[in-house]
């Protein structure tokens, strides 16, 4: 839509005419008994129907659709009938009621009322006039539906409400918050040929705006008090060019937590450019005219940049998949080959390992890791507790011993000193380690040799499968915390396996039920049976039973019991 249309319809009437719409009156003659009590005339332009209303205080006594008004006669025509004091009389004639005659208290409005009613009658037959009238009276109204309050003011599509915005661009997924009082944190960095930036304005970050990500579009809207100075960059997601091999490379470098898969890390990281601590997101695409554009946007918050990049990636992937399914072609053919052929459309949940279409996964904003919508519920960013301990080695990439904190989370343990985080679901075994079984496991522990093996020392061995399907072993000296730590890990491991198996069962059932089901539960690597730590000699294997006994013994609190029970059920 072009803005000239708006302007031309505005010019067909004088907006000042609509400044007042309520008038004090006295009804002189009316066929309608109720309206004889009316003290107010209200001219009411509405989206569905323009009306004239007769009111007394808050009560509407008579409503006449403007379309029904046949004739409006004012004082000059009929005043003679009502004597000299009545010099401001109006007679309205209409289809349903024959007529109503009233005196306007303030004489100067007689003309205005006449003009207003005539204008609204014209508007009944002219939709753009009707729109112009309504948006003049209610500047906060959505220009499209004329029903909702506007949410956005875009140069390209005018003032729209969220619902009309979504009709145009698809469901809103993310939007930046316009915050005029605080520092504006989202800015355009250049890169689009229609909106070139000089080096100077780049460094000044002179072009603040807001960003929107919908199912189908990425939009940057340049902010300006002056509406005429606004503009938007509207990028259809299906035209976004992503170099998917670069994407994987970027993701590999992002996997700071060794041992977890690149299949659940940092989606969209190839959109991210960091320079001098400034984080930008670059969105390369081919515009409608076939031109290559690469606009970039500055985020002062690295976390929000990650969120945006991840969501952008997911939905570009979705848009591309839809394209290849429809067999549509855009850009040139080599683009298709280079981009779509190796697009990663599925990824696995960090916790349960199930595989999903990428856009069905939730990306945790803190660790930029993907989760299924069930496991994200059990993923916490706050540790339950930490134990200061000694890592003795065992992991193939980290053979050296180190003093470190081990943090216990609801779904994983983290050992920051060696950049490890291990979901309980991937653990297969936890047991006490002494010299004998360390030798039996052929573990070469540099740390142990370094500070000397003592007969009485009991260490803890945790075995797990890392994100690259490598079996790994971790050996810890939990010292006086050994009992607590082992019990915690064992409980969590048990509960997580149980929950995970239930999820997999469910997925398998769904797979059988519907061939089109997209989650691929069967791709999860097989994990060996869990071995219990040796000091736990309970012979009942039912986890719920164990839990009950431990609660009964007072080993765990009521909260812990409830929480673990929920996991098990
Ligand atoms: Zn609307
Ligand atoms: Zn999951
Ligand atoms: Zn996280």
Image: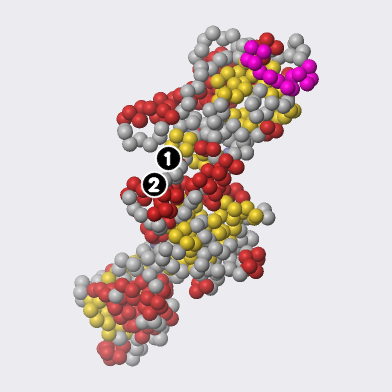
Residues shaded magenta: 439-452
Quadrant for ligand 3 reads top right
Residue 418 image position (x, y, % from top left) = 68, 32
Q: Say which of 86 and 376 sits in front.
A: 376
Q: Quadrant of the N terminus?
A: bottom left
Q: Nearer the viewer, mark 2 or mark 1?
A: 2
For marks 2 and 1, give the CA distance. Answer: 10 Å
Instruction: Give the labeled residue for mark 1.
Output: 357
Is 441 part of what is drawn in magenta? yes
Q: Is 513 left, or right, of 468 in this rendering? A: left
Residue at 53% over, 68% down: 195
Residue 515 image position (x, y, % from top left) = 31, 33
Residue at 73% over, 22% down: 446
> Are the residues flagged by discs 2 and 1 in contact, CB closer than 8 Å?
yes
Per the rendering, the mark at residue 425 is none
Q: Does dot 2 land on a helix, a strand or a loop?
A: helix
Residue 469 image position (x, y, % from top left) = 53, 28
Q: Say which of 37 and 499 sits in front.
A: 499
Residue at 50% over, 69% down: 194
Q: Is mark 1 within 8 Å of ligand 2?
A: no
Whether residue 45 is visible to the viewer of this picture, yes or no, is yes
Q: Does dot 1 land on a helix, a strand or a loop?
A: strand
Instruction: Give the labeled residue for mark 2.
Output: 321
Q: Residues within 10 Å of mark 1 (few under 14, many from 20)?
A: some
Residue 75 image position (x, y, % from top left) = 31, 88
Residue 486 to residue 12: above or below = above
Q: Earlier in the sequence, mark 2 or mark 1?
A: 2
Q: Residues within 10 Å of mark 2 (few under 14, many from 20)?
A: some
Q: Is mark 2 within 8 Å of ligand 2?
A: no
């Amino acid at each position: 839509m072009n803005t000239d249309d708006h302007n031309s319809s505005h010019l067909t009437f004088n907006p000042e005419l609509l400044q007042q719409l309520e008038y004090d009156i006295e009804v002189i003659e009316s066929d309608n008994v109720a309206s004889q009590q009316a003290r107010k005339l209200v001219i009411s332009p509405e989206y569905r129907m323009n009306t004239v209303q007769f009111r007394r205080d808050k009560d509407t006594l008579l409503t006449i659709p403007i379309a029904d008004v046949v004739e409006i006669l004012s004082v000059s025509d009929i005043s003679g009938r009502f004597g000299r004091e009545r010099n401001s009389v109006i007679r309205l004639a209409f289809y349903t009621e024959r007529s109503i005659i009233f005196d306007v208290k303030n004489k100067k409005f007689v003309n205005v009322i006449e003009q207003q009613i005539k204008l609204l009658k014209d508007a009944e037959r002219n939709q753009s006039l009707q729109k112009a009238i309504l948006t003049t009276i209610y500047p906060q109204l959505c220009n499209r539906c004329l029903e909702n309050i506007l949410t956005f003011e875009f140069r390209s599509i005018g003032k729209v409400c969220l619902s009309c915005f979504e009709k145009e661009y698809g469901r809103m997924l993310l939007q930046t918050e316009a915050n005029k009082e605080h520092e504006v944190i989202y800015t355009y960095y250049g890169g689009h040929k229609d909106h070139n930036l000089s080096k100077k304005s780049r460094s000044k970050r002179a072009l603040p705006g807001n960003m929107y990500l919908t199912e189908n579009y990425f939009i940057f809207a340049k902010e300006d008090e002056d509406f005429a100075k606004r503009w938007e960059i509207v990028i259809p997601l299906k035209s976004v060019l992503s170099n998917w091999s670069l994407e994987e490379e970027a993701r590999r470098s992002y996997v700071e937590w060794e041992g977890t898969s690149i299949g659940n890390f940092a989606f969209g990281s190839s959109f991210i450019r960091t320079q001098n601590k400034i984080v930008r997101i670059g969105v390369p695409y081919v515009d409608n005219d076939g031109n290559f554009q690469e606009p970039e946007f500055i985020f002062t918050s690295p976390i929000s940049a990650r969120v945006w990049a991840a969501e952008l990636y997911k939905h570009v992937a979705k848009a591309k998949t839809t394209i290849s399914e429809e067999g549509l072609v855009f850009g040139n053919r080599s683009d298709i080959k280079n981009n779509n052929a190796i697009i990663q459309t599925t990824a696995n949940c960090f916790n349960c390992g199930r595989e999903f279409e990428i856009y069905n996964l939730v990306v945790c904003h803190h660790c930029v890791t993907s989760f299924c919508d069930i496991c994200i519920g059990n993923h916490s960013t706050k540790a339950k507790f930490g134990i200061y301990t000694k890592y003795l080695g065992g992991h193939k990439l980290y053979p050296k011993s180190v003093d470190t904190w081990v943090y216990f989370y609801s779904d994983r343990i983290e050992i920051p000193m060696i950049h490890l985080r291990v979901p309980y679901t991937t653990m297969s075994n936890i047991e006490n380690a002494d010299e004998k079984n360390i030798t039996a496991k052929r573990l070469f522990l540099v740390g142990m040799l370094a500070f000397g093996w003592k007969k009485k020392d009991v260490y803890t061995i945790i075995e797990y499968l890392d994100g690259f399907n490598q079996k790994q072993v971790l050996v810890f000296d939990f010292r006086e915390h050994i009992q607590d730590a082992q019990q915690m890990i064992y409980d969590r491991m048990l509960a997580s396996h149980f929950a995970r198996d239930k999820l997999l069962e469910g997925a398998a059932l769904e797979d059988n039920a519907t061939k089109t089901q997209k989650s691929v539960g069967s791709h999860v690597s097989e994990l060996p049976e869990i071995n219990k730590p040796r000091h736990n000699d309970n012979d009942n294997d039912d986890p719920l039973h164990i839990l009950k006994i431990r609660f009964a013994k007072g080993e765990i609190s009521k909260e812990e019991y409830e929480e673990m029970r929920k996991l098990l059920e």
